[in-house]
Amino acid sequence: MTATGAVWRNWARTEEARPLRVERPRTTAAVQRAVRAAGGSGIPIKAVGAGHSFTGIAVATGVQLALDDLAGLVGRPTADGRATFYAGTRLRDIPRLLAPYGLAMTNLGDIDGQSISGAISTGTHGTGSGYGGLAGQVRGMTLITGDGESMRVDDENNAELLPAVALGLGALGILAEVTIACVPRFLLESVERSEPLADVLDALAERTASADHFEFFWFPHTTTALTKTLTRLPVTAGRRPLPFGRRWVDETLMGNGVYRVSCFAGTVLPPVIPVVNRLATTLAGNRKFTDVSHRIFSTRRTVRFREMEYGLPAEKVPAAVREIEALIAEKRWHISFPIEVRFAAADDLWLSTAYGRDTGYVAVHRYVHENPARYFAAVESILINHGGRPHWGKMHTQDATTLRPLYPRFDEFLAVRDRLDPRRLFSNPYLTRVLGS
C-alpha cells in the first residue's frame, strides 16, 4: 500500500486522480480481500495497469488497485497452448515468459507497455484482417465480482459470460488472472514501403485480404502512405533482423529523438509542419527484414501524444480517410502526427468495436503539447457518419445514449453488469458516461 493522497496520472496526461488509498496486491487472494474491504466500506475500487488508456476508464476515485506486482505466469501452459497470466503482466514481458514453452501470442498491438488485463478490457488490437483483437485470444479469466467472490469464467465455467467478461471495460469486476490461447512461436517478415496514398486507398480491400497483417500511416500534407505488410513464417525460416545500427537510427534516433524535436518545433512555428512531414516521408526508406513476431508487431514509442480511434466497417475506410484529408486541407490545420490505419476480423464479443463486422481502424493523434479538441471533434464527426465505434481506451465524446445503437448486445452487457456489480463498486465517471448509471 502507498501513502494516501498521491496523484495518479495516465501516460498521456489526459486524466489524473487522487485515490483515497492505493493497494498493490501480489496474489489473487489479495485482490479478493481488497474488493471485500472496499465493498464493506462502500468505497469504489478500480484496477489500474500501465495507465496507457487516453480516457478515464481506469480513474479510481476510491481505492486504486495497482497491479504491477500481480504479474507473471500462473503455472505452466497447457498442452494445447493455453497460458494463464496474472492480470498485471505487461504485454512486453509475455514473449519472455512464453519463450521456454515455444509459444507466442497470435497477434499484438503496436505498443506493448499495457497490462494484459487493461489491454483486453479496453479492446486493444493489432492489425490483420484475419485476426481479432487481443480480447479475442482470451479463453478464460478469474474475476473478483462486486460481492467479493472469485468467479472462474471459461468454456467450462460460466461460459455464457465469456463474450461480456473478455472485454468488460473493468465494469464487471477486477480481473485477477487471464487465460490466453497461444500459438507456436513464429517469425514475421516485414516489408515497409512508401507508396502513393491514392493507390493504397484504391486497392485497400485487396491489400488487406492478400496479407497476413497490413497497416499504413499517412502524414497529413503529403501524398504518401508508409505501408507495412507482414507475412507469418515458421521459426525454421530463419531470422534476418535489421542490423542494430540501422534499427537504432530508424527507431531511436529518427522515430523518437528527431521526431520529438520536430513535433515541439511545430508547436512553436506550425507552418513548418508540412515541410517536416514531407521530409519524414522522404527519409522513410524501404525496409525488409524478418524477426520473431513480437519484435515486429510492437515498436518503442517515447514521444507522448493524445489519440482518438474509431473502428469502421472495413469497406468504409478509404472514403473516411479521403474525407479527413479534405478536412485538413479545407481547415488549413497543421497536423504533425500521422493517421494510422489498421484492420481486424469480426468477432462475437459484445462490446468489441469489431463485433459482427470486419473492421478498419482509423486513428488520429496530436502531440501532447497541442490542443486536440477541434481536430478530434471534426474527425470524430466523419467517423461517426461512417458507422464508427470509438475505441474504449482512446479519446471520444460518445455516451450510453449514442453507443447503445452501435452494439446489438449492449443491454445484455448491462444486465450482466447488474448481476456482477449491482452496487456499482467498479464504476467511475467514465463508465457512468458510456454505460449509464
Image (cartoon, rainbow, N blue to C red):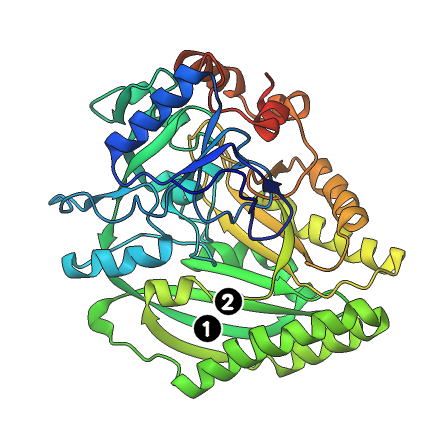
Residue 88: which disc?
A: none
Amino acid type, residue under disc 1 in the picture: Val
Residue that carries the numbered disc 1 in the rendered image: 191
The CA distance from mark 2 to mark 1 is 6 Å
Classify 10 Å Cα crowding around label 1: few (below 14), some (14-19), many (20 and above): some
**Mark 1 falls on what kind of element?**
strand
Q: Picture coordinates of residue 156 (x, y %)?
A: 20, 23
**Mark 2 falls on what kind of element?**
strand
Residue 228: which disc?
A: 2
Tell me which residue sits at (35%, 28%) in the image.
34
Tag 2 and tag 1, C-beta contact below 8 Å: yes
- Compared across the picture, whether 88 is left or right of 80 comes to right
Classify 10 Å Cα crowding around label 2: few (below 14), some (14-19), many (20 and above): some
Q: Is residue 403 above or below residue 244?
A: above
Q: Picture coordinates of residue 334 (x, y %)?
A: 81, 64
Q: Picture coordinates of residue 6 (x, y %)?
A: 53, 43
Tell me which residue sits at (52%, 57%) in the image.
206
Q: Is residue 412 above or below residue 429?
A: above
Q: In which quarter of the image is the C terminus?
A: top right
Q: Picture coordinates of residue 168 (x, y %)?
A: 44, 29
Quarter holding residue 116:
top left
Quarter holding residue 268:
bottom right
Does residue 289 appear in the picture of this structure? yes
Q: In which quarter of the image is the N terminus?
A: top left
Observer-nearest of 206 and 305: 305
Tell me which residue sits at (81%, 75%) in the image.
272
Observer-nearest of 341 and 151: 151
Tell me which residue sits at (51%, 84%) in the image.
249
Amino acid type, residue under disc 2 in the picture: Lys
Observer-nearest of 294 and 421: 421
Does residue 143 appear in the picture of this structure? no
